Image (spheres, coloured by chain):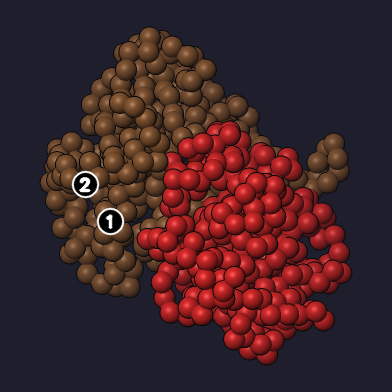
Chain colours: A brown, B red
Amino acid sequence: MENNANMFWTGLSPDEAREALVNKDKSMRDKRMSLKDAVSKFINDGDNVGIGGFVDVRQPIATCHEMIRQGFKDLTLSFQSAGMAPEYLGAAMILNPEKCNIKRIELAYWAHEGFGLAPGWRYLAERGLIDIEDWSNYNMSARFKAGSMGLPFIPTRSPLGGDIKDTSRTKIIDCPFTGRKIGVIPASNPNVSVLHVQAADKFGNCIIRGTDCTCAEIAMASAHTIVTCEQLVSHELLCSNPKDVMIPFAAVDAVVEVPYGAYPGACRRHYWFDGDHIRNFLGLIAPIVKGGPTDALKAYFDEYIYGVENFEGFLQKVGVKDLLAVKALEMQNCERLA
Amino acid sequence: MTASTDYTAQEIIVVAGSKILEDNKIVFVGTGLPMVAALLANRTHAPGLIPVFEAGAVGPPLRHGLPVSVGDSRTFTGASYVKGLNAAFELTQRGFADFGFIGGAEVDMYGNLNSTMMGDYPDGYQTPKVRLPGSGGASDMAASCERTILIVPHDKKKFNQQVSYMTSPGHLDGSPGARQKAGMQGKGPYRVITTKGICDFEEGSNRMRLIHTYPGETVESIQEATGFELLVSPDVSEFPAPTVEEIRLIREEIDPNGVFVKRVAK
Protein backbone atom coordinates (compact mmCIF):
# COMPACT_ATOMS: atom_id res chain seq x y z
CA MET A 1 0.00 0.00 0.00
CA GLU A 2 1.37 3.42 -0.95
CA ASN A 3 1.11 6.04 1.74
CA ASN A 4 1.26 9.39 0.00
CA ALA A 5 0.68 11.87 2.77
CA ASN A 6 0.32 11.75 6.51
CA MET A 7 -3.15 10.54 7.35
CA PHE A 8 -5.00 12.92 9.53
CA TRP A 9 -8.59 14.02 9.92
CA THR A 10 -9.00 17.67 9.10
CA GLY A 11 -12.57 17.89 10.35
CA LEU A 12 -14.07 15.26 12.60
CA SER A 13 -12.75 11.73 12.54
CA PRO A 14 -15.43 9.18 11.61
CA ASP A 15 -15.75 8.20 15.28
CA GLU A 16 -16.04 11.81 16.40
CA ALA A 17 -18.65 12.46 13.71
CA ARG A 18 -20.69 9.53 14.95
CA GLU A 19 -20.36 10.70 18.55
CA ALA A 20 -21.46 14.22 17.59
CA LEU A 21 -24.70 12.87 16.14
CA VAL A 22 -25.32 10.49 19.03
CA ASN A 23 -25.13 13.41 21.45
CA LYS A 24 -27.17 15.78 19.32
CA ASP A 25 -30.74 16.85 20.03
CA LYS A 26 -32.48 15.41 16.99
CA SER A 27 -35.96 16.57 17.94
CA MET A 28 -38.23 18.17 15.38
CA ARG A 29 -38.09 21.65 16.82
CA ASP A 30 -38.24 25.18 15.50
CA LYS A 31 -34.72 26.03 14.29
CA ARG A 32 -35.40 29.48 12.91
CA MET A 33 -32.91 32.08 14.05
CA SER A 34 -31.06 35.08 12.68
CA LEU A 35 -28.06 34.42 10.48
CA LYS A 36 -26.00 36.39 12.98
CA ASP A 37 -26.95 33.96 15.75
CA ALA A 38 -26.51 30.91 13.54
CA VAL A 39 -22.97 31.85 12.50
CA SER A 40 -21.99 32.86 16.01
CA LYS A 41 -23.41 29.66 17.50
CA PHE A 42 -22.24 27.05 15.01
CA ILE A 43 -19.04 28.28 13.35
CA ASN A 44 -15.98 28.21 15.58
CA ASP A 45 -12.35 29.08 15.00
CA GLY A 46 -10.42 26.09 13.73
CA ASP A 47 -13.49 24.43 12.20
CA ASN A 48 -13.61 22.49 8.99
CA VAL A 49 -16.43 24.20 7.07
CA GLY A 50 -18.19 22.32 4.26
CA ILE A 51 -19.46 24.72 1.61
CA GLY A 52 -22.50 23.86 -0.50
CA GLY A 53 -23.45 24.74 -4.05
CA PHE A 54 -21.38 24.33 -7.17
CA VAL A 55 -19.14 27.08 -8.60
CA ASP A 56 -21.46 30.13 -8.57
CA VAL A 57 -24.68 28.15 -8.28
CA ARG A 58 -26.42 28.13 -4.89
CA GLN A 59 -23.35 29.22 -2.95
CA PRO A 60 -24.11 30.29 0.66
CA ILE A 61 -23.13 33.91 0.04
CA ALA A 62 -25.24 35.50 2.79
CA THR A 63 -23.63 33.19 5.34
CA CYS A 64 -20.14 34.01 4.04
CA HIS A 65 -20.84 37.74 4.41
CA GLU A 66 -21.94 37.17 8.01
CA MET A 67 -18.85 35.03 8.69
CA ILE A 68 -16.70 37.91 7.45
CA ARG A 69 -18.48 40.46 9.66
CA GLN A 70 -17.92 38.23 12.69
CA GLY A 71 -14.37 37.20 11.71
CA PHE A 72 -12.98 33.65 11.56
CA LYS A 73 -9.67 31.98 12.35
CA ASP A 74 -7.81 28.89 11.14
CA LEU A 75 -10.69 27.54 9.10
CA THR A 76 -10.40 24.58 6.79
CA LEU A 77 -12.73 25.00 3.81
CA SER A 78 -14.00 21.85 2.09
CA PHE A 79 -15.89 21.95 -1.19
CA GLN A 80 -15.96 20.41 -4.65
CA SER A 81 -16.22 23.39 -7.01
CA ALA A 82 -16.80 26.83 -5.62
CA GLY A 83 -16.72 30.42 -6.80
CA MET A 84 -17.95 33.44 -4.88
CA ALA A 85 -18.12 31.80 -1.43
CA PRO A 86 -14.34 31.28 -1.11
CA GLU A 87 -13.74 34.42 -3.18
CA TYR A 88 -15.45 36.55 -0.50
CA LEU A 89 -13.81 34.65 2.39
CA GLY A 90 -10.42 34.75 0.67
CA ALA A 91 -10.71 38.45 -0.16
CA ALA A 92 -11.53 39.15 3.50
CA MET A 93 -8.30 37.35 4.40
CA ILE A 94 -6.33 39.40 1.86
CA LEU A 95 -7.62 42.60 3.50
CA ASN A 96 -7.27 41.58 7.11
CA PRO A 97 -5.63 38.20 7.87
CA GLU A 98 -5.82 38.88 11.60
CA LYS A 99 -9.60 39.06 11.52
CA CYS A 100 -10.38 36.54 8.77
CA ASN A 101 -8.09 33.61 8.36
CA ILE A 102 -8.27 30.42 6.30
CA LYS A 103 -5.73 27.75 7.21
CA ARG A 104 -6.41 25.08 4.65
CA ILE A 105 -8.52 24.31 1.59
CA GLU A 106 -9.59 20.86 0.38
CA LEU A 107 -11.10 21.31 -3.04
CA ALA A 108 -11.62 20.26 -6.61
CA TYR A 109 -11.90 23.67 -8.25
CA TRP A 110 -12.00 27.32 -7.37
CA ALA A 111 -12.80 29.66 -10.26
CA HIS A 112 -15.88 31.06 -11.97
CA GLU A 113 -16.22 29.17 -15.28
CA GLY A 114 -17.60 31.72 -17.79
CA PHE A 115 -16.85 34.63 -15.46
CA GLY A 116 -13.15 33.92 -15.20
CA LEU A 117 -10.39 32.69 -12.93
CA ALA A 118 -10.31 33.23 -9.16
CA PRO A 119 -7.81 35.95 -8.21
CA GLY A 120 -8.34 35.26 -4.49
CA TRP A 121 -7.21 31.67 -5.06
CA ARG A 122 -4.13 32.78 -6.95
CA TYR A 123 -3.24 35.28 -4.23
CA LEU A 124 -3.54 32.83 -1.34
CA ALA A 125 -1.96 29.86 -3.13
CA GLU A 126 0.90 31.58 -4.93
CA ARG A 127 2.01 33.29 -1.71
CA GLY A 128 1.85 30.00 0.22
CA LEU A 129 -0.64 31.40 2.74
CA ILE A 130 -2.78 28.25 3.01
CA ASP A 131 -2.38 24.48 2.96
CA ILE A 132 -3.78 23.03 -0.23
CA GLU A 133 -5.20 19.58 -0.85
CA ASP A 134 -6.34 19.07 -4.43
CA TRP A 135 -9.06 16.57 -5.23
CA SER A 136 -11.54 16.19 -8.08
CA ASN A 137 -15.25 17.00 -8.10
CA TYR A 138 -16.11 13.34 -7.73
CA ASN A 139 -13.43 12.82 -5.08
CA MET A 140 -14.79 15.62 -2.88
CA SER A 141 -18.39 14.57 -3.52
CA ALA A 142 -17.56 10.96 -2.70
CA ARG A 143 -15.65 12.03 0.42
CA PHE A 144 -18.77 13.83 1.68
CA LYS A 145 -20.83 10.81 0.67
CA ALA A 146 -18.58 8.50 2.70
CA GLY A 147 -19.00 10.89 5.63
CA SER A 148 -22.78 10.83 5.15
CA MET A 149 -22.74 7.02 5.00
CA GLY A 150 -20.91 6.76 8.32
CA LEU A 151 -17.91 5.16 6.63
CA PRO A 152 -14.24 6.15 7.04
CA PHE A 153 -13.41 5.99 3.33
CA ILE A 154 -14.82 5.30 -0.11
CA PRO A 155 -13.23 3.64 -3.14
CA THR A 156 -13.15 5.68 -6.36
CA ARG A 157 -11.20 5.43 -9.56
CA SER A 158 -10.46 9.03 -10.33
CA PRO A 159 -7.42 9.71 -8.19
CA LEU A 160 -5.68 6.87 -10.07
CA GLY A 161 -2.96 7.59 -12.57
CA GLY A 162 -2.34 11.31 -12.13
CA ASP A 163 -0.70 13.44 -9.47
CA ILE A 164 -3.80 14.03 -7.29
CA LYS A 165 -3.18 10.73 -5.54
CA ASP A 166 0.28 11.93 -4.52
CA THR A 167 -0.69 15.36 -3.20
CA SER A 168 -3.71 14.13 -1.24
CA ARG A 169 -4.44 11.53 1.41
CA THR A 170 -5.41 8.99 -1.27
CA LYS A 171 -4.22 5.46 -0.77
CA ILE A 172 -3.98 3.02 -3.64
CA ILE A 173 -4.84 -0.54 -2.68
CA ASP A 174 -5.29 -3.79 -4.52
CA CYS A 175 -9.03 -4.40 -4.69
CA PRO A 176 -9.71 -7.37 -2.38
CA PHE A 177 -12.19 -8.77 -4.91
CA THR A 178 -10.81 -8.08 -8.39
CA GLY A 179 -7.11 -7.73 -7.54
CA ARG A 180 -6.93 -4.54 -9.65
CA LYS A 181 -5.69 -1.26 -8.22
CA ILE A 182 -8.30 1.02 -6.72
CA GLY A 183 -8.11 4.38 -4.94
CA VAL A 184 -9.50 4.78 -1.45
CA ILE A 185 -10.10 8.29 -0.18
CA PRO A 186 -10.94 9.48 3.34
CA ALA A 187 -14.41 10.58 4.37
CA SER A 188 -14.98 14.28 4.95
CA ASN A 189 -16.95 15.03 8.12
CA PRO A 190 -16.93 18.84 8.49
CA ASN A 191 -17.61 20.42 11.88
CA VAL A 192 -20.19 22.57 10.20
CA SER A 193 -21.66 22.99 6.74
CA VAL A 194 -23.16 26.10 5.19
CA LEU A 195 -25.79 25.63 2.50
CA HIS A 196 -28.29 27.69 0.55
CA VAL A 197 -31.45 25.97 -0.75
CA GLN A 198 -34.68 26.97 -2.48
CA ALA A 199 -37.13 26.02 0.26
CA ALA A 200 -37.15 24.84 3.86
CA ASP A 201 -39.53 24.48 6.77
CA LYS A 202 -38.78 25.67 10.28
CA PHE A 203 -37.55 22.23 11.28
CA GLY A 204 -34.87 22.21 8.59
CA ASN A 205 -36.39 19.94 5.96
CA CYS A 206 -35.07 21.20 2.62
CA ILE A 207 -36.15 21.13 -1.01
CA ILE A 208 -33.54 21.75 -3.70
CA ARG A 209 -34.25 22.63 -7.34
CA GLY A 210 -31.90 22.26 -10.27
CA THR A 211 -28.61 20.64 -9.37
CA ASP A 212 -28.53 18.85 -6.03
CA CYS A 213 -24.81 19.69 -6.04
CA THR A 214 -23.44 17.69 -3.08
CA CYS A 215 -25.54 19.53 -0.50
CA ALA A 216 -27.38 16.58 1.00
CA GLU A 217 -24.18 14.59 1.45
CA ILE A 218 -22.40 17.58 3.01
CA ALA A 219 -25.27 18.18 5.44
CA MET A 220 -25.48 14.54 6.43
CA ALA A 221 -21.71 14.30 6.91
CA SER A 222 -21.37 17.43 9.06
CA ALA A 223 -21.86 17.71 12.79
CA HIS A 224 -23.85 20.92 12.29
CA THR A 225 -25.54 22.53 9.31
CA ILE A 226 -26.67 26.11 8.73
CA VAL A 227 -29.30 26.40 6.00
CA THR A 228 -30.35 29.63 4.36
CA CYS A 229 -33.36 29.40 2.05
CA GLU A 230 -35.11 31.51 -0.54
CA GLN A 231 -38.48 30.58 0.86
CA LEU A 232 -39.52 29.38 4.30
CA VAL A 233 -42.80 27.49 4.04
CA SER A 234 -45.05 25.46 6.29
CA HIS A 235 -44.03 21.95 7.20
CA GLU A 236 -47.22 20.63 5.58
CA LEU A 237 -46.42 22.24 2.23
CA LEU A 238 -42.73 21.42 2.29
CA CYS A 239 -43.34 17.75 3.05
CA SER A 240 -46.46 17.34 0.88
CA ASN A 241 -44.37 15.07 -1.32
CA PRO A 242 -41.82 13.69 1.14
CA LYS A 243 -39.62 12.32 -1.64
CA ASP A 244 -38.96 15.93 -2.68
CA VAL A 245 -37.19 16.49 0.61
CA MET A 246 -33.48 16.44 -0.14
CA ILE A 247 -32.16 17.15 3.36
CA PRO A 248 -34.03 15.89 6.43
CA PHE A 249 -34.63 18.08 9.48
CA ALA A 250 -32.39 16.04 11.76
CA ALA A 251 -29.32 17.04 9.74
CA VAL A 252 -30.03 20.75 10.10
CA ASP A 253 -29.37 23.02 13.10
CA ALA A 254 -30.29 26.50 11.91
CA VAL A 255 -32.84 27.69 9.34
CA VAL A 256 -32.74 31.25 8.07
CA GLU A 257 -34.93 32.71 5.36
CA VAL A 258 -32.62 34.82 3.18
CA PRO A 259 -34.07 35.73 -0.22
CA TYR A 260 -31.28 36.19 -2.77
CA GLY A 261 -28.96 34.39 -0.33
CA ALA A 262 -26.78 33.07 -3.19
CA TYR A 263 -26.56 36.41 -5.04
CA PRO A 264 -24.51 37.43 -7.06
CA GLY A 265 -24.45 33.74 -7.93
CA ALA A 266 -27.51 31.94 -9.26
CA CYS A 267 -30.36 30.04 -7.63
CA ARG A 268 -32.65 28.08 -9.94
CA ARG A 269 -36.23 29.35 -10.23
CA HIS A 270 -35.28 32.56 -8.42
CA TYR A 271 -32.41 34.39 -10.15
CA TRP A 272 -29.60 33.82 -12.63
CA PHE A 273 -26.00 34.99 -12.22
CA ASP A 274 -25.21 38.68 -11.96
CA GLY A 275 -22.19 38.41 -14.23
CA ASP A 276 -21.40 42.11 -13.97
CA HIS A 277 -21.29 42.04 -10.18
CA ILE A 278 -19.12 38.91 -10.18
CA ARG A 279 -16.71 40.25 -12.80
CA ASN A 280 -16.51 43.59 -11.06
CA PHE A 281 -15.66 41.92 -7.76
CA LEU A 282 -12.99 39.72 -9.37
CA GLY A 283 -11.60 42.83 -11.02
CA LEU A 284 -11.05 44.39 -7.59
CA ILE A 285 -8.88 41.46 -6.46
CA ALA A 286 -6.98 40.77 -9.68
CA PRO A 287 -4.53 43.71 -9.41
CA ILE A 288 -3.66 42.71 -5.82
CA VAL A 289 -2.36 39.34 -7.09
CA LYS A 290 0.32 41.29 -8.94
CA GLY A 291 1.13 43.43 -5.90
CA GLY A 292 -1.29 46.28 -6.59
CA PRO A 293 -3.13 48.28 -3.91
CA THR A 294 -6.06 46.94 -1.91
CA ASP A 295 -7.99 50.25 -1.78
CA ALA A 296 -10.71 49.35 -4.26
CA LEU A 297 -11.36 45.97 -2.66
CA LYS A 298 -11.42 47.55 0.78
CA ALA A 299 -13.93 50.12 -0.45
CA TYR A 300 -16.19 47.31 -1.69
CA PHE A 301 -15.99 45.52 1.67
CA ASP A 302 -16.60 48.75 3.57
CA GLU A 303 -19.65 49.53 1.51
CA TYR A 304 -21.24 46.13 0.90
CA ILE A 305 -20.22 43.95 3.86
CA TYR A 306 -18.79 45.84 6.82
CA GLY A 307 -20.99 48.85 6.14
CA VAL A 308 -24.26 46.93 6.50
CA GLU A 309 -25.97 45.09 9.34
CA ASN A 310 -27.03 42.04 7.41
CA PHE A 311 -27.63 40.62 3.94
CA GLU A 312 -30.75 42.71 3.47
CA GLY A 313 -28.49 45.74 3.82
CA PHE A 314 -26.25 44.32 1.09
CA LEU A 315 -29.25 43.79 -1.19
CA GLN A 316 -30.37 47.37 -0.58
CA LYS A 317 -26.95 48.58 -1.72
CA VAL A 318 -27.13 46.35 -4.81
CA GLY A 319 -30.49 47.85 -5.63
CA VAL A 320 -33.80 46.75 -7.06
CA LYS A 321 -32.75 47.19 -10.68
CA ASP A 322 -30.03 44.54 -10.58
CA LEU A 323 -32.09 42.16 -8.45
CA LEU A 324 -35.03 42.36 -10.84
CA ALA A 325 -32.71 41.88 -13.81
CA VAL A 326 -31.28 38.57 -12.55
CA LYS A 327 -34.78 37.42 -11.64
CA ALA A 328 -36.00 38.21 -15.16
CA LEU A 329 -33.08 36.28 -16.66
CA GLU A 330 -33.92 33.21 -14.63
CA MET A 331 -37.57 33.43 -15.66
CA GLN A 332 -36.37 32.92 -19.23
CA ASN A 333 -34.41 29.84 -18.18
CA CYS A 334 -37.33 28.17 -16.48
CA GLU A 335 -40.58 29.76 -17.43
CA ARG A 336 -43.42 29.28 -14.93
CA LEU A 337 -46.80 30.72 -14.24
CA ALA A 338 -46.84 32.90 -11.17
CA MET B 1 -21.66 25.47 -47.88
CA THR B 2 -19.58 28.59 -48.31
CA ALA B 3 -16.32 28.56 -46.41
CA SER B 4 -15.85 31.37 -43.92
CA THR B 5 -12.87 33.64 -44.41
CA ASP B 6 -13.43 35.45 -41.13
CA TYR B 7 -13.20 33.13 -38.15
CA THR B 8 -11.13 33.04 -34.97
CA ALA B 9 -8.93 30.32 -33.51
CA GLN B 10 -11.53 29.59 -30.84
CA GLU B 11 -14.26 29.33 -33.45
CA ILE B 12 -12.42 26.69 -35.48
CA ILE B 13 -11.80 24.78 -32.22
CA VAL B 14 -15.53 24.77 -31.60
CA VAL B 15 -16.30 23.58 -35.14
CA ALA B 16 -13.65 20.85 -34.96
CA GLY B 17 -14.92 19.77 -31.55
CA SER B 18 -18.49 19.57 -32.72
CA LYS B 19 -17.58 17.44 -35.78
CA ILE B 20 -15.83 14.86 -33.58
CA LEU B 21 -18.96 14.38 -31.48
CA GLU B 22 -21.06 11.53 -32.85
CA ASP B 23 -24.83 11.61 -32.99
CA ASN B 24 -26.74 9.54 -30.41
CA LYS B 25 -23.80 9.20 -28.06
CA ILE B 26 -23.61 10.28 -24.44
CA VAL B 27 -21.00 12.97 -23.97
CA PHE B 28 -19.91 14.27 -20.57
CA VAL B 29 -19.36 17.94 -21.29
CA GLY B 30 -16.83 20.01 -19.37
CA THR B 31 -17.13 23.76 -18.94
CA GLY B 32 -16.10 26.31 -21.56
CA LEU B 33 -15.52 25.57 -25.24
CA PRO B 34 -16.74 21.93 -24.91
CA MET B 35 -20.20 23.31 -24.06
CA VAL B 36 -20.20 25.49 -27.15
CA ALA B 37 -19.03 22.59 -29.33
CA ALA B 38 -21.74 20.30 -27.93
CA LEU B 39 -24.39 22.91 -28.70
CA LEU B 40 -23.10 23.36 -32.25
CA ALA B 41 -23.09 19.59 -32.81
CA ASN B 42 -26.63 19.42 -31.48
CA ARG B 43 -27.73 22.19 -33.89
CA THR B 44 -26.04 20.59 -36.90
CA HIS B 45 -25.18 16.94 -37.47
CA ALA B 46 -25.94 15.47 -34.03
CA PRO B 47 -29.50 16.30 -32.92
CA GLY B 48 -29.53 13.06 -30.93
CA LEU B 49 -26.40 13.89 -28.94
CA ILE B 50 -27.00 13.40 -25.22
CA PRO B 51 -25.03 15.86 -23.11
CA VAL B 52 -24.36 15.12 -19.45
CA PHE B 53 -23.24 17.93 -17.15
CA GLU B 54 -21.32 17.08 -14.01
CA ALA B 55 -23.56 19.12 -11.74
CA GLY B 56 -26.24 16.59 -12.56
CA ALA B 57 -28.28 17.28 -15.71
CA VAL B 58 -28.64 14.49 -18.27
CA GLY B 59 -29.87 15.09 -21.81
CA PRO B 60 -31.22 18.65 -21.73
CA PRO B 61 -32.33 20.11 -25.08
CA LEU B 62 -30.28 23.29 -24.38
CA ARG B 63 -32.87 25.59 -25.93
CA HIS B 64 -32.47 28.37 -23.40
CA GLY B 65 -29.10 29.70 -24.37
CA LEU B 66 -25.51 28.82 -23.63
CA PRO B 67 -24.91 27.70 -20.05
CA VAL B 68 -22.29 29.82 -18.31
CA SER B 69 -21.67 27.01 -15.84
CA VAL B 70 -22.13 23.24 -15.96
CA GLY B 71 -24.46 23.78 -12.99
CA ASP B 72 -26.39 26.56 -14.75
CA SER B 73 -30.18 26.47 -14.64
CA ARG B 74 -29.99 26.31 -18.44
CA THR B 75 -28.58 22.77 -18.26
CA PHE B 76 -31.60 21.58 -16.25
CA THR B 77 -34.66 22.83 -18.08
CA GLY B 78 -36.01 19.95 -20.14
CA ALA B 79 -33.40 17.46 -18.89
CA SER B 80 -34.42 13.81 -18.67
CA TYR B 81 -32.75 13.13 -15.36
CA VAL B 82 -31.37 15.50 -12.77
CA LYS B 83 -29.47 14.72 -9.63
CA GLY B 84 -26.15 15.95 -8.26
CA LEU B 85 -22.43 15.47 -8.66
CA ASN B 86 -22.17 12.02 -7.14
CA ALA B 87 -24.88 10.65 -9.43
CA ALA B 88 -23.32 12.22 -12.54
CA PHE B 89 -19.86 10.83 -11.84
CA GLU B 90 -21.26 7.45 -10.89
CA LEU B 91 -22.84 7.30 -14.36
CA THR B 92 -19.40 7.88 -15.80
CA GLN B 93 -17.64 5.41 -13.57
CA ARG B 94 -20.28 2.84 -14.46
CA GLY B 95 -19.63 3.28 -18.19
CA PHE B 96 -22.55 5.38 -19.39
CA ALA B 97 -20.37 8.12 -20.90
CA ASP B 98 -19.11 7.38 -24.42
CA PHE B 99 -17.08 10.56 -24.51
CA GLY B 100 -15.69 13.05 -22.04
CA PHE B 101 -14.92 16.47 -23.40
CA ILE B 102 -12.42 18.48 -21.37
CA GLY B 103 -9.94 21.31 -21.56
CA GLY B 104 -6.64 22.01 -19.87
CA ALA B 105 -3.82 24.51 -19.65
CA GLU B 106 -1.01 22.12 -20.56
CA VAL B 107 -0.72 18.74 -22.28
CA ASP B 108 2.06 16.24 -23.00
CA MET B 109 2.54 13.80 -25.90
CA TYR B 110 0.47 11.11 -24.15
CA GLY B 111 -2.53 13.37 -23.59
CA ASN B 112 -1.94 13.89 -19.88
CA LEU B 113 -3.48 17.23 -18.92
CA ASN B 114 -2.67 19.86 -16.32
CA SER B 115 -5.25 22.26 -14.90
CA THR B 116 -3.82 22.50 -11.37
CA MET B 117 -0.62 24.52 -11.21
CA MET B 118 2.41 25.82 -13.06
CA GLY B 119 5.69 25.74 -11.24
CA ASP B 120 8.03 23.40 -9.49
CA TYR B 121 6.30 20.11 -8.72
CA PRO B 122 6.42 18.37 -6.27
CA ASP B 123 8.56 20.70 -4.14
CA GLY B 124 6.61 23.82 -5.03
CA TYR B 125 3.14 22.26 -4.87
CA GLN B 126 2.17 24.41 -1.86
CA THR B 127 3.65 27.56 -3.44
CA PRO B 128 2.82 27.34 -7.14
CA LYS B 129 4.16 29.89 -9.58
CA VAL B 130 0.72 30.13 -11.14
CA ARG B 131 -2.22 28.53 -9.41
CA LEU B 132 -4.87 27.24 -11.83
CA PRO B 133 -8.46 26.40 -10.81
CA GLY B 134 -7.86 22.67 -10.19
CA SER B 135 -9.32 19.49 -11.59
CA GLY B 136 -13.01 20.20 -11.27
CA GLY B 137 -14.46 17.10 -12.91
CA ALA B 138 -11.77 16.80 -15.58
CA SER B 139 -9.71 14.12 -13.83
CA ASP B 140 -12.90 12.14 -13.15
CA MET B 141 -13.82 12.23 -16.82
CA ALA B 142 -10.24 11.37 -17.77
CA ALA B 143 -10.24 8.35 -15.47
CA SER B 144 -13.65 6.95 -16.33
CA CYS B 145 -15.18 8.17 -19.60
CA GLU B 146 -14.70 5.62 -22.38
CA ARG B 147 -12.81 8.11 -24.55
CA THR B 148 -11.80 11.68 -23.96
CA ILE B 149 -11.56 14.62 -26.32
CA LEU B 150 -9.15 17.32 -25.20
CA ILE B 151 -9.09 20.99 -26.10
CA VAL B 152 -5.80 22.82 -25.60
CA PRO B 153 -4.74 26.12 -27.22
CA HIS B 154 -1.65 25.36 -29.28
CA ASP B 155 1.64 26.88 -28.30
CA LYS B 156 5.05 25.63 -27.30
CA LYS B 157 4.53 26.48 -23.64
CA LYS B 158 1.35 24.42 -23.47
CA PHE B 159 2.40 21.38 -25.49
CA ASN B 160 5.20 20.21 -23.23
CA GLN B 161 7.51 17.24 -22.89
CA GLN B 162 6.24 16.96 -19.34
CA VAL B 163 3.28 18.68 -17.69
CA SER B 164 3.92 20.58 -14.43
CA TYR B 165 1.24 18.58 -12.66
CA MET B 166 -0.74 15.68 -14.07
CA THR B 167 -4.31 16.59 -13.15
CA SER B 168 -6.14 14.44 -15.69
CA PRO B 169 -4.36 11.25 -16.66
CA GLY B 170 -4.31 10.35 -20.35
CA HIS B 171 -2.16 7.51 -21.68
CA LEU B 172 0.25 8.03 -18.73
CA ASP B 173 3.75 7.00 -19.94
CA GLY B 174 2.31 5.57 -23.14
CA SER B 175 3.27 1.99 -22.31
CA PRO B 176 0.77 -0.66 -23.39
CA GLY B 177 -2.02 -1.15 -20.88
CA ALA B 178 -0.73 1.67 -18.63
CA ARG B 179 -4.24 2.91 -17.83
CA GLN B 180 -5.53 -0.54 -16.98
CA LYS B 181 -2.48 -1.24 -14.81
CA ALA B 182 -3.07 1.99 -12.91
CA GLY B 183 -6.64 0.81 -12.21
CA MET B 184 -8.38 3.22 -14.58
CA GLN B 185 -11.13 2.45 -17.07
CA GLY B 186 -11.72 3.58 -20.62
CA LYS B 187 -9.49 3.93 -23.63
CA GLY B 188 -8.24 7.38 -22.69
CA PRO B 189 -7.52 10.36 -24.94
CA TYR B 190 -9.00 10.00 -28.41
CA ARG B 191 -8.54 13.40 -30.03
CA VAL B 192 -6.75 16.63 -29.18
CA ILE B 193 -8.26 19.72 -30.72
CA THR B 194 -5.91 22.67 -30.79
CA THR B 195 -5.86 26.14 -32.30
CA LYS B 196 -3.70 24.78 -35.14
CA GLY B 197 -4.98 21.31 -35.96
CA ILE B 198 -6.33 18.00 -34.71
CA CYS B 199 -4.34 15.06 -33.34
CA ASP B 200 -5.09 11.48 -32.48
CA PHE B 201 -2.87 8.99 -30.64
CA GLU B 202 -0.84 6.41 -32.55
CA GLU B 203 -1.85 2.86 -31.80
CA GLY B 204 0.88 1.03 -29.90
CA SER B 205 2.98 4.03 -28.86
CA ASN B 206 -0.02 6.07 -27.64
CA ARG B 207 1.85 9.18 -28.80
CA MET B 208 0.12 12.28 -30.06
CA ARG B 209 -0.10 12.29 -33.85
CA LEU B 210 -1.16 15.07 -36.17
CA ILE B 211 -4.07 14.08 -38.42
CA HIS B 212 -5.46 17.45 -39.59
CA THR B 213 -3.92 20.86 -40.12
CA TYR B 214 -6.12 23.95 -40.10
CA PRO B 215 -6.10 26.28 -43.12
CA GLY B 216 -2.96 28.41 -43.04
CA GLU B 217 -1.01 25.88 -40.96
CA THR B 218 1.44 23.23 -42.13
CA VAL B 219 2.90 20.14 -40.50
CA GLU B 220 6.07 22.18 -39.98
CA SER B 221 4.36 25.23 -38.46
CA ILE B 222 2.49 23.00 -36.03
CA GLN B 223 5.62 21.03 -35.07
CA GLU B 224 7.35 24.37 -34.54
CA ALA B 225 4.69 25.33 -31.99
CA THR B 226 4.92 22.03 -30.13
CA GLY B 227 7.34 21.37 -27.27
CA PHE B 228 7.78 17.69 -28.13
CA GLU B 229 8.17 15.65 -31.31
CA LEU B 230 4.75 15.30 -32.85
CA LEU B 231 4.10 12.17 -34.91
CA VAL B 232 2.47 12.81 -38.27
CA SER B 233 -0.16 10.55 -39.76
CA PRO B 234 0.64 9.30 -43.28
CA ASP B 235 -2.87 10.47 -44.18
CA VAL B 236 -2.57 13.96 -42.65
CA SER B 237 -4.97 16.31 -44.38
CA GLU B 238 -6.27 19.85 -44.15
CA PHE B 239 -9.30 20.40 -41.95
CA PRO B 240 -11.74 22.52 -43.94
CA ALA B 241 -12.41 26.09 -42.85
CA PRO B 242 -15.66 26.51 -40.92
CA THR B 243 -18.63 27.36 -43.08
CA VAL B 244 -20.28 30.76 -43.00
CA GLU B 245 -23.32 29.07 -41.48
CA GLU B 246 -21.32 27.43 -38.67
CA ILE B 247 -19.74 30.76 -37.76
CA ARG B 248 -23.14 32.46 -37.88
CA LEU B 249 -24.57 29.82 -35.53
CA ILE B 250 -21.74 30.33 -33.03
CA ARG B 251 -21.86 34.13 -33.13
CA GLU B 252 -25.55 34.76 -33.39
CA GLU B 253 -27.27 31.82 -31.77
CA ILE B 254 -24.97 29.81 -29.52
CA ASP B 255 -22.63 32.30 -27.85
CA PRO B 256 -23.90 35.74 -28.89
CA ASN B 257 -22.37 37.41 -25.83
CA GLY B 258 -18.92 35.89 -26.33
CA VAL B 259 -18.95 34.17 -22.95
CA PHE B 260 -16.57 31.41 -24.02
CA VAL B 261 -15.81 32.20 -27.68
CA LYS B 262 -13.89 35.44 -27.53
CA ARG B 263 -14.08 37.78 -30.48
CA VAL B 264 -10.32 38.19 -30.87
CA ALA B 265 -8.88 38.37 -34.36
CA LYS B 266 -7.31 35.17 -35.68
User: Quick check: B25 above or below B128?
Assistant: above
Residue topped by disc 1? A276
For mark 2, name the chain.
A
Residue at image coords 26%, 53%? A277
Element type at mark 2? helix
Residue A207 visible to an observer of this rendering: yes
Quadrant where the C terminus of chain A sits is: top left
Q: Nearer the viewer, residue B39 or A40?
A: B39
Q: Position of residue A13 (x, y in %)?
A: 55, 33
Residue B41 in picture, x, y percent from top left: 60, 56
Q: Name the residue located 69 percent from the left edge and 51 percent from the top edge.
A: B23
> In whole angstroms, how far apart are the C-alphas of marks 1 and 2?
10 Å
Q: Which structural element holds mark 1?
A: helix
Viewer can see residue A128? no
Mark 2 burial class by Cα count in 10 Å: few <14, some 14-19, many 20+: some
Depth check, front residue: A235 or A51: A235
* Amino acid type of the residue that numbered disc 1 sits on in the rendered structure: Asp
> Residue type at mark 2?
Asp
Circle 2 residue: A322
